[in-house]
């Protein structure tokens, strides 16, 4: 997703499974009150489509389009739409820096966890505005890794975050994108911008088990691991230690983890 095509997570099944947990309700709540039936919506960086399908239901009979550069994710998205019986959504391959749509093609353009992976998020926002109709909305939400918080303290998770910051920035992205969204929108020339924040919280036994298991796998098998090993940022043994730190955290009855997101709504 970075401008040079490098995406630090990759598309390992553990990554797609993590992305597949996301829904319109738990990941786009700030946008939902602004959606209306009959609107045309573009979801940029749609991944496996779990948010897109939920948004499509809310704008029906308007059309919804999910766009992503990864064919693996698009296949999952199409399968989900078919299984869900959602017929007003189409999934296509493409790049946010050069959207394959005419000017003023959509009422709403949405991006979740996208700008953090781009080396030029400001240009991406300008391109998203190009395909948004006058009076329409651009909705963007991104995590902020430095703002993530957990209990109990874990040197292993501290090291995981440090490693992720390094890999993400070497890939051309900004892992602390959440706090920068408002500034990027202003730099892109937008004035009618509403900023907010949202949180995912993993604190019950099932959520802890799932979140810790997902990251224990991702830190040893996904694109993150590949980048870390190829660039000499960690050894296989060190990555396994980070995976164990995730498993240890997931086993704590008092374990608690929050992911803080920045959110912006831009009226075009």
Image (cartoon, helix red, strand yellow):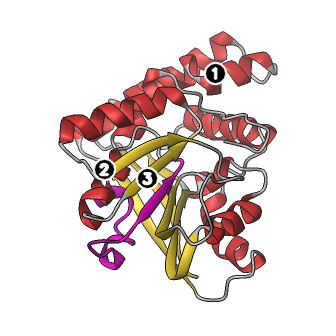
Between residue 238 and residue 215, name the one nearer to us.
215
Kindly identify which residue carries mark 3. 65
Residue 44 inside the magenta-drawn segment? yes
Residue 186 inside the magenta-drawn segment? no
At 59% from the left and 88% from the top, the residue drawn is: 192
* Kind of element beneath mark 2: helix
Q: Residues within 10 Å of mark 1 (few under 14, many from 20)?
A: many
The magenta segment is: 25-45
Q: Is residue 111 left or right of residue 122?
A: left
Q: Are marks 2 and 3 in contact (CB under 8 Å)?
A: no
Q: Nearer the viewer, mark 3 or mark 1?
A: 3
* Kind of element beneath mark 1: helix
Quadrant in the rendering for residue 208: top left
**118 shown above or below 103:** above
Q: Residue 126 location, x and y as percent? A: 71, 69
Q: Residue 139 location, x and y as percent? A: 50, 69
Q: Nearer the viewer, mark 2 or mark 3?
A: 3
Q: Are marks 2 and 1 in contact (CB under 8 Å)?
A: no
Between residue 50 and residue 257, name the one nearer to us.
50
Q: Residues within 10 Å of mark 3 (few under 14, many from 20)?
A: many
**Extreme-front residue of the structure:** 102
Label 2 or label 3, whichever comes before in sequence order: 2
Q: Quadrant of the N terminus?
A: top right
Q: Quadrant of the C terminus?
A: bottom right
Kindly identify which residue carries mark 2. 53
At 76% from the left and 38% from the top, the residue drawn is: 166
């Amino acid at each position: 997703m970075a401008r040079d095509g490098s995406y630090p997570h990759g598309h390992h099944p553990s990554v797609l499974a993590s992305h597949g947990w996301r829904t319109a309700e738990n990941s786009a709540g700030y946008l939902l009150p602004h959606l209306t039936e009959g609107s045309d919506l573009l979801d940029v960086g749609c991944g496996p489509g779990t948010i897109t399908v939920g948004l499509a239901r809310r704008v029906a009979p308007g059309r919804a389009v999910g766009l992503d550069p990864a064919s693996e994710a698009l296949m999952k998205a199409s399968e989900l739409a078919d299984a869900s019986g959602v017929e007003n959504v189409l999934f296509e391959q493409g790049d946010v820096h050069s959207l394959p749509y005419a000017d003023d093609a959509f009422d709403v353009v949405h991006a979740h966890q996208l700008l953090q992976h781009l080396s030029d998020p400001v240009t991406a926002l300008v391109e998203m505005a190009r395909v948004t109709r006058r009076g329409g909305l651009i909705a963007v939400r991104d995590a902020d890794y430095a703002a993530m918080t957990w209990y109990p303290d874990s040197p292993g998770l501290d090291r995981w975050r440090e490693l992720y910051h390094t890999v993400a920035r070497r890939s051309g992205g900004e892992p602390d994108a959440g706090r920068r969204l408002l500034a990027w929108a202003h730099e892109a020339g937008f004035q009618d911008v509403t900023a907010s924040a949202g949180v995912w919280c993993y604190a019950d036994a099932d959520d802890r088990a799932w979140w810790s298991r997902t990251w224990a796998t991702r830190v040893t098998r996904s694109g993150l691991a590949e980048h870390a090993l190829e660039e000499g940022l960690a050894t296989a043994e060190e990555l396994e230690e980070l995976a164990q730190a995730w498993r240890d955290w997931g086993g704590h009855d008092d374990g608690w983890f929050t992911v803080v997101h920045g959110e912006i709504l831009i009226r075009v």
